[in-house]
Image (cartoon, helix red, strand yellow):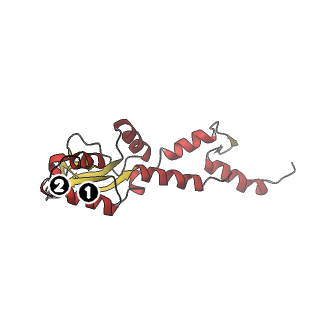
Amino acid sequence: MHLTRATLRPDLAILTMSGFLDARPRVGYFYSGKTANQLMGEHIRNLHVKDYKSVPVVVTEATSVYDAICTMFLEDVGTIFVIKKEGYLIGVVSRKDLLQTAMGKQDLSSIPVGVVMSRMPNLITCTPEDTLHYAAQQMMRHQVDSLPVVRPFQGDDRHLEVIGRISKTTLAKAFVELGQHISV
């Protein structure tokens, strides 16, 4: 090809950074053996929840079902996290929970969400250090629309503080973002 090393070096560096090539001193460049799909899978498994989490929507357990429905509508979310007045997570209320309650002929303003929510320890959560891949697996396995992102509550391992949320929409945004960085 009659090309100099200086001419090829930028291209080889790009192929090395993308994972298609490996480089070793005194050996040179060589094919890593990984396909584009394998490299994309590795990249996806290295995306962390902390980089994609959004602001959680929370209410206290005393909040009425009516107010929870209004909050869900105004915040445009499908899941609301329920906390104690002290601030730690005690439950989750979903659209399905609220719809099921609204189907009865009851005064929604008189029913607290604490009665209709799913309670701890039956909640599926994730931490900021978890990967988006893990969060997506949890959502699929447990058939939920979102997960609370939690950390220990003020140093107390028995309780969890909600610091964010990961939803199916979050995962879709991350997927679209990945697609924008791929050039064909």
- Tell me which residue sits at (15%, 50%) in the image: 106
| Residue kind at label 1, given as amino acid type | Ile
Write down the residue under mark 1: 69
* Cα gap from disc 1 to disc 2, whole angstroms: 9 Å
Q: Which mark is residue 140?
A: none
Image spot of residue 12 (x, y percent): 70, 50
Q: Is residue 55 left or right of residue 65?
A: right
Closer to the camera, 140 or 95?
Answer: 95
Secondary structure beneath disc 1? Answer: helix
- Tell me which residue sits at (55%, 52%) in the image: 178
Mark closest to the chain's N terminus, 1 or 2: 1
Image spot of residue 165 (x, y percent): 34, 54
Task: In the rendered view, tell whether residue 38 sits above or below residue 184.
Answer: above
Q: Nearer the viewer, mark 1 or mark 2?
A: 2
The count of marks equals 2
Q: Is residue 153 among what the camera can see?
A: no
Image spot of residue 116 (x, y percent): 18, 46
Q: Is residue 17 left or right of residue 53?
A: right
Q: Are marks 1 and 2 in contact (CB under 8 Å)?
A: yes
Q: Residues within 10 Å of mark 1 (few under 14, many from 20)?
A: many
Closer to the camera, 72 or 80?
Answer: 72
Write down the residue under mark 2: 108
